[in-house]
Image (cartoon, rainbow, N blue to C red):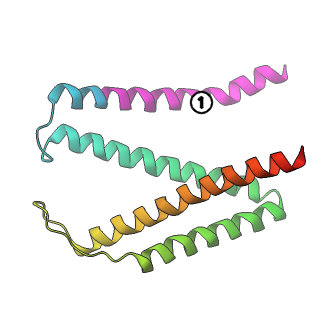
Amino acid sequence: MKEANEKRENRPWKILELILFLVSLVLFVVVLVNKPTGVESGSLDTFLYWIYVLVLFAICVTLLFPLFAAFKNKKKLLRLVLLIVAAVVIIGGAWLLAPGKPIDTNAVTKASDFKMADTVLFVTYLMVAAAVCSLIWSAIRKAVKK
């Protein structure tokens, strides 16, 4: 009986997941069929906007689920607040370190675009370095425990 209730509770998420996947697949096929030759293509713009929607959805879900869980336990709430503060410090530090130096391009770009691109690159480099360090640390820790 418990499994049946869990399946019913998960059904709306599965349906939403299927709908998002199908829309993404259709837009991807439309872009492939149209074979855009430049950045001015309408189908490419639609696909990029859909990607923005999916990323925004992923960010919201990633933040909302821990937030709901955190209100059930004060320890989890404190951990979530510390995680948010750490994220703000990391992104803010990357923003301050990012040079945002303009480069020559054929497209019209603003200086803030370069600053944002540099910030995203710095955060990405930091996250990759943290992932590699955690892999090495877990391997060393596992070897020491044995």
Q: Residue at x 75, y 58 (%)?
A: 70
Q: Residue 115 vs residue 12: left or right?
A: left
Foreground: 60 or 84?
A: 84
The image shows residue 25 at horizontal and vertical percentages of 36, 27
The image shows residue 2 at horizontal and vertical percentages of 84, 24
| Label 1 crowd (10 A; few <14 / some 14-19 / many >=20) | few
The magenta segment: 1-26
In the image, residue 3 lies in the stretch drawn in magenta: yes
Q: Secondary structure at mark 1?
A: helix
- Compared to residue 39, the image places residue 90 above or below, namely below
Q: Residue 58 vs residue 38: left or right?
A: right
Q: Which residue is mark 1?
A: 12
Q: Main secondary structure of the magenta part?
A: helix
Q: Residue 47 vs residue 121: left or right?
A: left
* Quadrant in the picture for the C terminus: top right
Which quadrant of the view contains residue 127?
A: bottom right
Q: Residue 64 vs residue 22: left or right?
A: right
- Compared to residue 103, the image places residue 139 above or below, namely above
In the image, residue 138 lies in the stretch drawn in magenta: no
Q: Count every numbered label the image shows and give the total.
A: 1
